Amino acid sequence: SSESPPRAQLAMPRGAVFRAGTAAVAAKQGASRSAGREPSLAEPWAPFGAALLQHWREAEAQRIAPGKFQGERLLLWSDLHPRQPEPIPVGLFFADRPSMPPAQQRALELCVERGGPVLDVGAGAGSHVLALAAQGLVAEGVDACEGAVEVMRLRGVNARQCSMWDLTALSHYRTLVLLMNTVGSVGSVAGLRSLLERLHIATAQDCHVLLDISTPDWASVLAAANRRADPFRSFRENRWVVLQCWLTFGGVAGQTFPLLFVEQEAVLKVAKATGWHALLVIKDEERQQALLQLRKV
């Protein structure tokens, strides 16, 4: 995770229905936030960390692989559907390599082709780091979420707590990876530009950056923009959308954070302006995701 939550699959919320048991409380939270009121809340990543820790402990106790275990789901809310969260299976963050989506698998292949060391930024539960280590690469993970770092260390990952904004001295890494829409947590196109500028300065000339993006669900965005009450305006059509999001897990509710969903053309333009040559590696139309590879001009 990173500076504002997950990365997770913080894919574009698509309005899935969640269990009725939490509906009443959750709907009240959504109504409160959409009205601009924030109750007493934890830091944005706290629900994510709580979800990872509980999932890991329960899976271990039942001797089930964490990627296969079906536990309580993490809820992703947004101002796109303030009363209707997206339930996220926590096992997604513990997936083994064969279970990962095509974009993530291809990113790992490219890392292996280049060799280590590799730094996974917003590493979550550390599954990508573990997959690379299994291939003989030196790989490390950083995450802004304390609970995520704890889980990674329990899984044997070389991990430390660090925001993407605080990364420095990255010159010894061959590749940086930002997967599961970690880059979305920059919160804006300006934030994306700032991050790519920082990484350009902190990395070696031959370093590559692999990042995946979640593209906007334009039908939902335009429908929200056309609502008479509480119109949704934080987007530039066919370019990008910024959602105000928050996470809940059990009794833990996190503060609101901005999450960027962006079309690949917008990323290519920002990359070029910050000294990177960006290449589209794979586009997953079904999941509305794309993997981009950045190298210095």
Image (tube, rainbow, N blue to C red):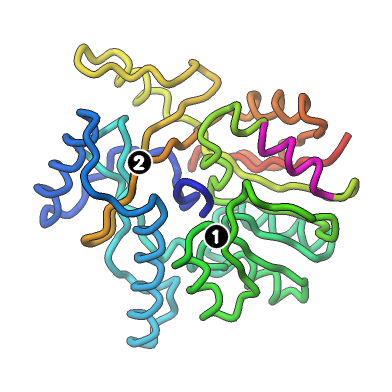
**Is residue 81 rendered to the left or right of residue 187?**
left
Of all residues shown, which one is farthest toward the front? 40
Q: Which secondary structure dominates the residues rendered in magenta?
A: helix
Q: Position of residue 152 (x, y in %)?
A: 54, 73
Question: Residue shown at 90%/46% (left/top)?
Answer: 205
Question: Residue shown at 77%/72% (left/top)?
Answer: 138
1 or 2: tag closer to the N-terminus: 1
Question: Residue shown at 32%/57% (left/top)?
Answer: 74
Q: Quadrant of residue 251?
A: bottom left
Nearer the observer: mark 1 or 2; the answer is 2
Question: Residue shown at 38%/52% (left/top)?
Answer: 43
Secondary structure beneath disc 1? loop
Residue bearing the label numbered 2:
256
Q: Position of residue 219 (x, y in %)?
A: 37, 23
Q: Amino acid at mark 2?
A: Thr
Would residue 54 be counted in the magenta stretch?
A: no
Q: Position of residue 78 (x, y in %)?
A: 32, 37
**Is residue 33 rendered to the left or right of residue 66?**
left
Residue segment shown in magenta? 194-203
Measured along the vertical axis of the image, is residue 152 above or below residue 165?
below
**From the image, which quarter does the C terminus lie in?**
top right
- Count residues near mark 1 (Cα–Cα under 10 Å), then give few for <14, some for 14-19, many for 20+: some
Q: Amino acid at mark 1?
A: Met
**Is residue 139 rendered to the left or right of residue 238?**
right
- Badges 1 and 2: C-beta atoms under 8 Å apart? no
Residue bearing the label numbered 1:
100
Distance CA(mark 1)–CA(mark 2): 28 Å
Comparing 31 with 227, the one in front is 31
